[in-house]
Amino acid sequence: MMDKDEFMAGFSKTFDKFREDRLKPPTPEQLKQKERMEQDIKEYGDAQEFTYRKVRCYMKRNYGWCGYLDCGITADEFESLEDLSHGGMTAHNGFDCAHPGDYPLDPAGEYRDYAYVKHVLERMVDELIKN
Protein backbone atom coordinates (compact mmCIF):
# COMPACT_ATOMS: atom_id res chain seq x y z
CA MET A 1 0.00 0.00 0.00
CA MET A 2 1.18 3.50 -0.84
CA ASP A 3 2.07 5.74 2.10
CA LYS A 4 1.01 9.37 2.39
CA ASP A 5 4.31 10.81 1.08
CA GLU A 6 4.25 8.56 -2.01
CA PHE A 7 0.64 9.51 -2.67
CA MET A 8 1.34 13.23 -2.32
CA ALA A 9 4.39 13.01 -4.58
CA GLY A 10 2.33 11.25 -7.28
CA PHE A 11 -0.53 13.71 -6.87
CA SER A 12 1.82 16.70 -7.13
CA LYS A 13 3.41 15.30 -10.28
CA THR A 14 -0.01 14.71 -11.88
CA PHE A 15 -1.26 18.17 -10.88
CA ASP A 16 1.91 19.86 -12.20
CA LYS A 17 1.48 18.07 -15.55
CA PHE A 18 -2.19 19.11 -15.70
CA ARG A 19 -1.31 22.75 -14.93
CA GLU A 20 1.52 22.71 -17.46
CA ASP A 21 -0.81 21.35 -20.17
CA ARG A 22 -3.43 24.02 -19.38
CA LEU A 23 -0.87 26.82 -19.78
CA LYS A 24 0.28 25.75 -23.23
CA PRO A 25 -1.16 27.63 -26.21
CA PRO A 26 -4.01 25.70 -27.85
CA THR A 27 -3.13 23.35 -30.68
CA PRO A 28 -4.95 23.50 -34.03
CA GLU A 29 -6.96 20.43 -32.97
CA GLN A 30 -7.97 22.11 -29.70
CA LEU A 31 -9.07 25.20 -31.63
CA LYS A 32 -11.14 22.95 -33.91
CA GLN A 33 -12.83 21.34 -30.88
CA LYS A 34 -13.56 24.80 -29.44
CA GLU A 35 -15.14 25.89 -32.74
CA ARG A 36 -17.30 22.73 -32.80
CA MET A 37 -18.48 23.43 -29.27
CA GLU A 38 -19.25 27.09 -30.01
CA GLN A 39 -21.24 26.12 -33.11
CA ASP A 40 -23.13 23.49 -31.12
CA ILE A 41 -24.02 26.04 -28.42
CA LYS A 42 -25.13 28.53 -31.06
CA GLU A 43 -27.34 25.95 -32.77
CA TYR A 44 -28.76 24.05 -29.77
CA GLY A 45 -28.30 26.25 -26.70
CA ASP A 46 -27.92 24.66 -23.28
CA ALA A 47 -30.89 22.29 -23.24
CA GLN A 48 -32.82 20.14 -25.69
CA GLU A 49 -35.46 17.47 -25.48
CA PHE A 50 -36.96 15.06 -27.96
CA THR A 51 -39.10 11.94 -28.02
CA TYR A 52 -37.72 8.78 -29.56
CA ARG A 53 -39.88 5.66 -29.80
CA LYS A 54 -42.28 7.16 -27.23
CA VAL A 55 -39.51 7.77 -24.67
CA ARG A 56 -38.78 11.36 -23.69
CA CYS A 57 -35.08 12.13 -23.84
CA TYR A 58 -33.51 15.32 -22.66
CA MET A 59 -30.10 16.86 -22.83
CA LYS A 60 -28.54 19.68 -20.89
CA ARG A 61 -25.14 21.26 -21.00
CA ASN A 62 -22.88 21.31 -17.98
CA TYR A 63 -19.19 21.17 -18.92
CA GLY A 64 -20.33 19.17 -21.90
CA TRP A 65 -23.65 17.64 -22.82
CA CYS A 66 -25.45 15.35 -20.37
CA GLY A 67 -28.12 12.99 -21.72
CA TYR A 68 -31.05 11.52 -19.79
CA LEU A 69 -33.98 9.17 -20.34
CA ASP A 70 -37.25 10.19 -18.74
CA CYS A 71 -38.60 6.74 -17.95
CA GLY A 72 -38.50 4.17 -15.20
CA ILE A 73 -35.51 1.84 -15.44
CA THR A 74 -35.06 -1.35 -13.47
CA ALA A 75 -31.70 -2.27 -11.95
CA ASP A 76 -31.17 -4.87 -14.70
CA GLU A 77 -32.00 -2.34 -17.42
CA PHE A 78 -29.71 0.21 -15.79
CA GLU A 79 -26.88 -2.32 -15.90
CA SER A 80 -27.60 -3.21 -19.55
CA LEU A 81 -27.28 0.48 -20.49
CA GLU A 82 -23.99 0.95 -18.67
CA ASP A 83 -21.84 0.01 -21.68
CA LEU A 84 -24.01 1.92 -24.16
CA SER A 85 -23.86 5.18 -22.27
CA HIS A 86 -20.88 7.47 -22.61
CA GLY A 87 -18.62 6.85 -19.62
CA GLY A 88 -21.22 4.94 -17.61
CA MET A 89 -24.67 5.64 -16.26
CA THR A 90 -25.38 8.29 -13.64
CA ALA A 91 -27.97 8.03 -10.87
CA HIS A 92 -30.37 10.08 -13.03
CA ASN A 93 -30.90 7.50 -15.81
CA GLY A 94 -28.35 9.14 -18.03
CA PHE A 95 -24.73 10.01 -18.63
CA ASP A 96 -22.43 12.99 -18.95
CA CYS A 97 -19.64 13.95 -21.28
CA ALA A 98 -17.24 15.25 -18.64
CA HIS A 99 -14.57 12.56 -18.52
CA PRO A 100 -10.88 12.44 -19.33
CA GLY A 101 -10.83 12.62 -23.11
CA ASP A 102 -13.89 14.89 -23.29
CA TYR A 103 -13.40 18.50 -24.40
CA PRO A 104 -13.67 21.08 -22.74
CA LEU A 105 -12.94 19.35 -19.42
CA ASP A 106 -9.89 17.79 -21.09
CA PRO A 107 -8.37 20.39 -23.44
CA ALA A 108 -6.76 17.63 -25.51
CA GLY A 109 -10.02 15.69 -25.67
CA GLU A 110 -12.80 15.35 -28.22
CA TYR A 111 -15.94 17.48 -28.08
CA ARG A 112 -19.08 15.28 -27.80
CA ASP A 113 -21.65 17.27 -29.75
CA TYR A 114 -25.46 17.29 -29.84
CA ALA A 115 -25.59 14.66 -32.60
CA TYR A 116 -23.30 12.32 -30.65
CA VAL A 117 -25.32 12.56 -27.41
CA LYS A 118 -28.64 12.21 -29.26
CA HIS A 119 -27.35 9.08 -30.99
CA VAL A 120 -26.24 7.55 -27.66
CA LEU A 121 -29.66 8.26 -26.14
CA GLU A 122 -31.41 6.65 -29.11
CA ARG A 123 -29.23 3.53 -28.79
CA MET A 124 -30.12 3.35 -25.11
CA VAL A 125 -33.86 3.56 -25.90
CA ASP A 126 -33.44 0.86 -28.57
CA GLU A 127 -31.79 -1.37 -25.96
CA LEU A 128 -34.60 -0.79 -23.46
CA ILE A 129 -37.27 -1.63 -26.03
CA LYS A 130 -35.37 -4.68 -27.27
CA ASN A 131 -35.28 -6.13 -23.75
Image (spheres, rainbow, N blue to C red):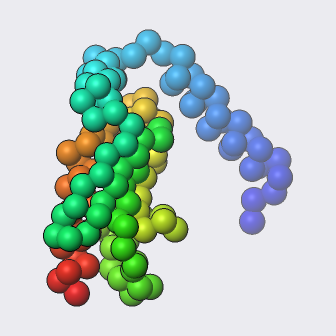
Count the marks.
0
- Image quadrant assignment for residue 31: top left
Q: Nearer the viewer, residue 52 or 65?
A: 52
Quadrant containing the N terminus in the rendered view: bottom right
- Image quadrant assignment for residue 79: bottom left
Q: Is residue 74 left or right of residue 18?
A: left
The residue at 45%/48% (across/down) is: 99
Q: Nearer the viewer, residue 57 or 96?
A: 57
Q: x, y (%) of residue 83?
A: 33, 69
Position of residue 85 relative to residue 36, above or below, is below
The residue at 17%/83% (across/down) is: 130
Question: Residue lying farthest top?
Answer: 25
Q: Is residue 55 left or right of residue 100?
A: left
Q: Is residue 130 left or right of residue 42?
A: left
Q: x, y (%) of residue 106?
A: 45, 35
- State whether residue 102 appears in this view: no
The residue at 30%/60% (across/down) is: 57
- State whether residue 111 appears in this view: yes
- Image quadrant assignment for residue 127: bottom left
Q: x, y (%) of residue 51?
A: 22, 61
The residue at 57%/22% (across/down) is: 20
Question: Residue lying farthest right?
Answer: 4
Position of residue 72 relative to residue 17, above or below, is below
Q: x, y (%) of residue 64?
A: 41, 40
Quadrant containing the C terminus in the rendered view: bottom left
